[in-house]
Image: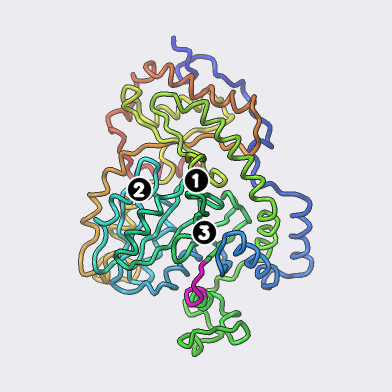
Amino acid sequence: MSNLALLGGKPLFEKGQCAPVSDFKWPIITEEDEQAVLDVVRNNKFSGTDITIKFQDEFAKWQGRKYALAFTNGTMSLTAAMFAIGLGVGDEIICPTKTYWGSVSQAINFGASAVFCNIDEHLSLDPEDLERCITPKTKAIMVVHYLGYPCDMDKIMAIANKHNLYVIEDCSHCHGSMYKGKKTGTFGHIAAMSMMSMKSFAAGELGMFVTDDRKLYERAIAFGHYERNNANYIIESEDLKDYFHIGVGGCKGRANQVSSALALGQLKYYDERTAEIRKAMNYFFDLIEDLPGVYPVRTNEAEGSTMGGFYCAAAVYKREELGGLSSKRFCQAVSAEFNGAFTAWEGINFCLHTHKFFKTFNLMNTEKPSRIAFSDRDVRVDDEKCAPSEYIECFNVPRFVKFDKEWIERYAAAYRKVCENYQDLLEGDEDKTSGGRWHGMDNAAEQQKKAK
């Protein structure tokens, strides 16, 4: 009998055994945070802007941009970014296929088409595939620093400048990540991001929009901040003044000040806390990076690039180094060793180009599906060129927020045990024949079942 827990052996962890809650609990909420929130509640400041404006000012300084604007959530801030650059009917916006749908799905609201780019070995947008996606209709590139790993902004910005394209950085995974000594979110024309409760920068449910361009900032205000779209806020753009007092996007994006109050507290300690996370996670990855098939998603900090808060820490998986063992079977075996202390799962986000939303969904009841409703070409035809991204496998790992050496080593041991005994898992691997291809619809449904 194998000593692997999945095959009847003894798990590394006893039932109910796990690291202290404080090793994983995030965000860190203090009495200072609680009092700030209670002030909003007791004084009915939910729909005000004073706390939000204070946070915006401080966040802009921290981010290194001139202007910051808070929204209800990250998807709204990304939508406002699309409006700000003038994304419109017939335009195309390029986005890596492996990301959360909120990075680009709302392009259909503007009559624009999402064009998908492949990802590289770090799961981020592959600049080598970028020019394939560019046509005369291309308006912008949506750069996603996936899982906190900073994209190759030197190459991306060079291509964008060559073709005169806008660049929007989706920084929802990379708050505070550095690329060659410069903070992500400071390269493109706009950066937008989520600060929902699971993110590295977690503030309940909040979105942020930052830019150095006054006109883009004012357009974002006009889009969903009707109470600031007026002369009191010194809107300089003449083409917006006729529309004062109405959110021109037909929506209301103002942040709830409970989230703004939380955000102020998180910003105060963010750099200190994420430095501790990076210390812990780099030590964990040091312990498993020599394992066959396991390639941690992390930067070389000696080169000035960092992972921010290691949002959704993960590793790329290469099944060919483990006899073709599927990532699904690998994760099942690792989870069995943890015995309830942690659940490993494969895939993270599915590839968007495989989802029927981008193939058949018809929002406006036009003759063609929404993604190509106003396009002069069927951009879906290019989806087959994103097939390489479907074969890049990955899996999540524990995200330590404290440097707890003993427990980090115990968690790392589970991955080592499975890798050292992988041959025992090959028989009965029902997913082995898939070759690693990640199918959007099938796996999305499976992840939903896991969530329940």
Q: Based on the displayed image, in which of its 4 quarters is residue 90 positioned?
A: bottom left
* Residue occupying image coordinates x 63% and y 85%: 232
Task: Count neighbours of disc 1 (C-alpha within 10 A) and say few if under 14, some if 14 to 19, many if 20 or more.
Answer: many
Which quadrant, please, contains the N terminus? top left
The three-letter amino acid code for the residue at tag 2 is: Cys
Q: Nearer the viewer, mark 3 or mark 1?
A: 1
Which callout, 3 or 1, points at the residue further toward the start of the chain?
Answer: 3
Residue at image location 39% in from the left, 54% down from the top: 154
Label 3 crowd bin: few (<14), some (14–19), many (20+), radius 10 Å: many
Residues in magenta, as a range: 211-217
Gap between marks 2 and 1 measured at Cα: 26 Å
Label annotation for residue 351: 2
Say what secondary structure mark 2 lies in: loop
For label 1, the SS is loop
Whether residue 451 sits left or right of residue 262 in the image: it is left
Q: Which residue is mark 1?
A: 305
Where is residue 242? Give x, y as percent. Answer: 49, 90
Contact between marks 2 and 1 (CB within 8 A): the answer is no
Circle nearer the viewer, 3 or 2:
3
The amino acid type of the residue labelled 3 equals Met
